[in-house]
Amino acid sequence: MGPMLSLGVDDEPKLHQWKPNAIASHLLRKRKGTRSYVSGASAVGLYWDYSASNMTGSSPEPVSGFYVIVVVDAELALSLGDLSGEFVKRLDQKIPTAESSLVSRREQVLGGSVYSTRARFGDGGREHDILIRCKGDGGGWDASESELVVSVDKKRVVQVRRLQWNFRGNQTIFIDGAPVDMMWDVGSWWFSSPPGHAVFMFRRRSALQSRLWLEEEMLHKERGVSGFSLIIQAFKNP
């Protein structure tokens, strides 16, 4: 179907329960346009243009040549893309920026055995280069040769040998001095027919000694907050 943009807005956000409904979710098939609507008591304005965007590599996102702007109640709520700054200036130089925090990121990638992306694991932190490399995917490799390697900023942080046997697991790594639980499940590549998708998840924890990420998620639910998570779903070419 080609590149598409979707937007969901919840006027009563509860991060651990958020599910966009049919009214608040919009699938935008045009590569450039604007849209305004009301969500609850908030006026939402959406502006986007990825008609000349540069789509390269395995990432599902454009690399450059695009912008996505969301304005809620006359405040800048979301600004994406290398062209967003210039568009915001044309929109209104004095528009205030709303306080925000990235809580979740999901990417879907297709084909190959090497996946790369960039992610920021905390407010105010820097972006990190993440590379996931899988050797052996059920296509004739000996089980003893299958392997998963994860690198952050070109430094190897996870290495799992005999991946076909250790197809599901987790390890704790450290990014910006904070613990991050890295989890993987690639069993569907070997044991499903037709093959499904592998899942790689990075979930930041708030304390070194602490709970596992699932226990911490329960605490976040009680407090009405959510920690950052990066989820990558990797599909094989048919």
Image (spheres, rainbow, N blue to C red):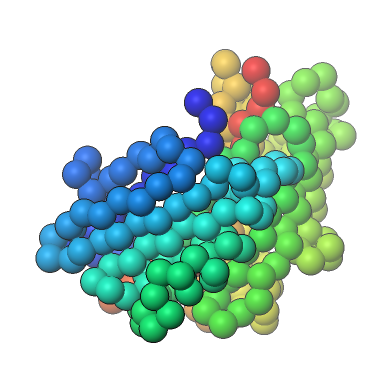
Question: Which is nearer the eye, 164 or 222?
Answer: 222
The correct choice, above or below, for 113 with respect to 218 in the image is above
The correct choice, above or below, for 141 with respect to 234 in the image is above
Residue 76 percent location from the top left of the image:
37, 72
Question: Which is nearer the eye, 212 or 121?
Answer: 121
Question: Which is nearer the eye, 191 or 139?
Answer: 139
Q: Residue at x 74, y 24 (%)?
A: 138
Residue 169 seen in this snapshot:
no
Q: Residue at x 45, y 52 (%)?
A: 48
Is 49 left or right of 56, judged from the image as shown? left
Q: Residue at x 75, y 33 (%)?
A: 112
Q: Residue furthest front?
A: 90
Is 154 left or right of 120, judged from the image as shown? right
Question: Which is nearer the eye, 99 or 119?
Answer: 99
Q: Residue at x 33, y 66 (%)?
A: 71
Q: Write down the quadrant of residue 143 in the picture.
A: top right
| Quadrant assignment for the C terminus | top right
Residue 119 percent location from the top left of the image:
62, 63
Q: Residue furthest left?
A: 41
The correct choice, above or below, for 54 with respect to 189 in the image is below
Residue 178 percent location from the top left of the image:
62, 78
Residue 57 percent location from the top left of the image:
73, 43
Residue 48 seen in this snapshot:
yes
The correct choice, above or below, for 89 with respect to 81 in the image is below
Number of marks: 0
Q: Write down the quadrant of residue 27 in the picture.
A: top left
